Image: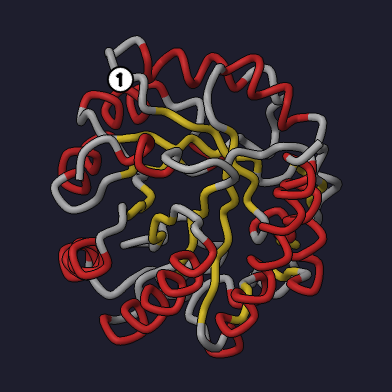
Amino acid sequence: MDNALNQLRSKPGFFLLAGPCVIEGRDMAFETAEHIAKVCSNLGIPFAFKGSYRKANRSRLDSFSGIGDLEALKILNAVGREFGVPVVTDIHQPEEAEMAADFVDILQIPAFLCRQTDLLTAAARTGKTVNIKKGQFLSPGSMRFAVEKVRSCGNDNVMVTERGTTFGYGDLIVDFRGVPQMQEACKAPVVVDCTHSLQQPNTSAGVTGGCPELIETIARAAVAVGADGLFIETHPNPAIAKSDGANMLRLDLLDMLMTRLVAIRRTIDSF
């Protein structure tokens, strides 16, 4: 599926990147994708399915990292073909770009790695859409340099994602001024990550916490300030999720949330 970014921007309003934190198995991936696809189809929201094929950034050595790279990538590819949507996954090292690009439509650069030139250019050279998450340590305006690295390879299919800024040792804060600032500085679509923005990292237990009760608050604000897209990790039962369950949206809550957000955007656009 070529030019996933154009597909996501094919309709007015916002688009959605959504799915589980990590691919845990085929059944869970398909259950989640089917539900999201139905919600988005009913509301006219362009949608890409998100799932990490491997989690490289883990606090503890014994944290779940994946079911195997090739198996997870094949599941992602099957989801995209079954539901006719783009799929997005993270890459962590330059040599992963070409491998992942054979299976997915959007390569995502994790926030901690957004300044890694070799990683950005490797992703760009695949020709796939590149989603760069803003580092928790970067200003909105500085993200233009990451975008320029992608475009220097002749790839203009790039977007950036706000996912919160480090606030002390164990919290994040979202500065919504960054949405229009990045839109202007990067000349690219800006996505707001409504779930990772609510993480509470660096806990003494070595497991990231979160505030999922505030997902709708972050999402409403993102839509209100004109974000081009939303990023929401969701799972049928976050309590038993193998990664980031503390800040994922329960899947059955997605329909009502998206309905409210579409209403907000339509109201704003009517003025």
**Which residue is depicted at the point 79% across and 50% down?**
172
**Which residue is depicted at the point 61% across and 81% down?**
250
Task: Check disc 1 and report its element: helix, strand or loop.
Answer: loop
Given the current orientation, which residue lies at the most extreme front position? Answer: 270
> Alpha-carbon neighbours of circle 1 within 10 Å: few (<14), some, or many (≥20)?
many
Left or right relative to 132: residue 3 = left
Q: Is residue 175 above or below residue 244?
A: above
Q: Is residue 38 or residue 26 the one in the foreground?
A: 38
Looking at the picture, the colour scheme in use is secondary structure
The percent coordinates of residue 171 (x first, y second) are: 81, 55
Left or right relative to 164: residue 61 = left
Image quadrant in which the C terminus is located: top right
Q: Is residue 256 or residue 164 the one in the foreground?
A: 256
Given the current orientation, which residue lies at the most extreme top position? Answer: 152
Given the current orientation, which residue lies at the most extreme right position? Answer: 168
The percent coordinates of residue 198 (x first, y second) are: 74, 60
The percent coordinates of residue 24 (x first, y second) are: 35, 79
The percent coordinates of residue 61 (x first, y second) are: 47, 69
- Tag 1 residue: 155
Q: Is residue 104 above or below residue 238?
A: above
Residue 158: quarter of image: top left
Q: Is residue 146 above or below residue 222?
A: above
Give amino acid for label 1: Asn
**Which residue is depicted at the point 74% across and 69% down?**
210
